[in-house]
């Protein structure tokens, strides 16, 4: 996997994870996620934004990854979502690395389920864990010609730990088992 | 001799993505890395996670034994997505 | 509007609502929703499912609408979301009517925001209100050749009332003002 | 004479999508509709919302005056999406 981070990889029939250097195939992934039993598909696309806590005038982010651990982590996250919401249909988690220009997607989560409740909740779970657990770093480049690593991150977390700690928005935080 | 892998700001501070660093414990390897790579690297390391062979380490890790072929990765904080 | 329910209609610069008899242009809407300030895009697609509370073996749903009120209602919902989450970038709400086969989308919500928190919450708000407030009815057709109106619906609600009553999942319900 | 618009199961029960029905109040129009369209329509109507000229009605609505050109819409429960 780590040797060819260029196209999504099927790991399990109903989970699809991948690391890619190309544009993320958003509509293909949404089509893939639809199954006859699933009436709800929730998609999250994280796109390069013109500002961050560090910088205004962002024109590009260069994503660096510990390549060979990305798909394993994405796969653990997809499995964690399915453990928690067994009714999920399909789960696709893709991360793009390399230089991504303003407005293009760097990360994609697609989750299908029979009903919207679990599709929304599981989609939120997946993107939250991607942002906590997947070894990818962002170097922002600005209109002023400067660039720098995004400095406001958190220590990378294990998927199992982050999954235990995760709770739906609005629910009181549970203690970590 | 263990291999150390450096990412993002750790790589940039050290001026390289990987190195071979002697040491029989993780503490010895990281001490030597601080010596070789300097103060900015040491600052990044202090905020980073360290994995050995893909496994995250917790708590006091300096005494963990290192062998030739071990892969020590320094992972700065991530901001994700 | 009601005379030409065939293509999405721009109503306000950053809100797009529409009633269509054709396939919903999902990826175009996601692309449209991306703005430089918005790093998060949440998309909900409601697709025709093979079962409901009434029936198994659904192969198609025929959607009937009080056409000329659909876009006005969708527009009120988009405005309601923007009132509640002023940071929203763009909001697209599309409903398809007529015969929609199994697996195709009948409804689309796309919401962009600087951060994922409000994109998820506003996306959920929009689809919940679409399902409560927009005058569209479903007639399901099954593999057995029979068909019938979906019987487990709720009385259609005003957007203002439904918006006041709506609360994020997990939060205690607030009294209606 | 007011126009009545019927949707989904209300349309099917009545056997038509629209009709002109005499009456000077909403109650008179709906009584006449029940007479014309029969018991199944009456059952659907009991579970439906009624709009006049696109406005939803609440509470006891039988006394609301109706004029020629008014558009009375019968909207059965929706299940959405």
Image (cartoon, coloured by chain):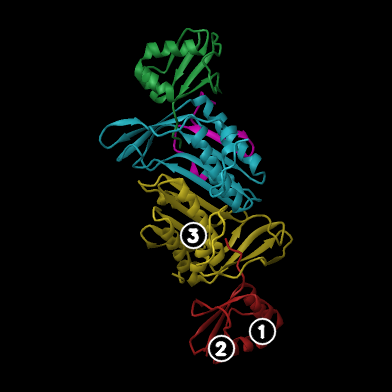
Chain colours: A cyan, B green, C yellow, D red
| Label 3 chain ID | C
Q: Please, which chain is the residue tagged with disc 1 on?
A: D
Element type where label 2 sits in the image: loop
Query: Viewed as shown, does residue C30 lie left or right of A116?
Result: left
Determine whether the residue tagged by mark 1 lies in a helix, strand or loop: helix
Q: In the shown orientation, is residue C143 left or right of residue B35?
A: right
Do tag 3 and tag 1 residues touch (Cβ < 8 Å)?
Answer: no
Q: Judge if badges 3 and 1 mark residues of a common chain.
A: no
x%, y% of residue B42? 39, 18
Say left or right for D24 vs A48. Answer: right
Magenta residue check for A22 = yes
Q: Which mark is residue C94?
A: 3
Residue D37's mark? 1
Tell me the magenta residue range: A1-27
Of residues A173 and C130, which is closer to you in this image? Answer: A173
Determine the CA span between mark 3 and mark 1: 34 Å
Task: Say whether mark 2 and mark 3 are on the same chain.
Answer: no
Label 1 vs 2, first from the N-terminus:
1
- Give the residue pinned by disc 2: D63
In the rendered image, residue C20 lying in the magenta stretch gets the answer no
């Amino acid at each position: 996997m780590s040797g060819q981070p260029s196209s999504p990889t099927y790991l399990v029939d109903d989970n699809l994870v991948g690391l890619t250097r190309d544009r993320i195939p958003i509509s293909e992934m949404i089509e893939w996620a639809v199954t006859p039993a699933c009436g709800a598909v929730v998609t999250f696309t994280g796109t390069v934004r013109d500002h961050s806590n560090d910088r205004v005038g962002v024109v590009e982010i260069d994503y660096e990854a510990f390549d060979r651990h990305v798909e394993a982590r994405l796969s653990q996250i997809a499995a964690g979502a399915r453990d928690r919401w067994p009714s999920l249909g399909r789960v696709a988690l893709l991360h793009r690395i390399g230089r991504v220009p303003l407005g293009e997607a760097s990360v994609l989560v697609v989750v299908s389920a029979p009903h919207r409740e679990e599709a929304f909740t599981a989609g939120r779970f997946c993107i939250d864990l991607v942002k906590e657990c997947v070894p990818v770093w962002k170097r922002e480049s600005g209109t002023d010609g400067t660039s720098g690593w995004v400095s406001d991150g958190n220590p990378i977390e294990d998927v199992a730990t982050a999954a235990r700690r995760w709770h739906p928005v609005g629910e009181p935080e549970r203690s970590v088992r | 001799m263990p291999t150390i892998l450096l990412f993002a700001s750790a790589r940039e501070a050290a001026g390289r993505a990987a190195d071979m660093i002697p040491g029989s414990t993780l503490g010895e390897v990281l001490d030597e890395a601080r010596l070789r790579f300097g103060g900015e690297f040491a600052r990044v390391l202090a905020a980073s996670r360290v994995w050995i062979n893909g496994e995250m380490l917790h708590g006091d890790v300096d005494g963990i034994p290192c062998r030739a072929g071990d892969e020590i990765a320094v992972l700065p904080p991530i901001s994700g997505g």
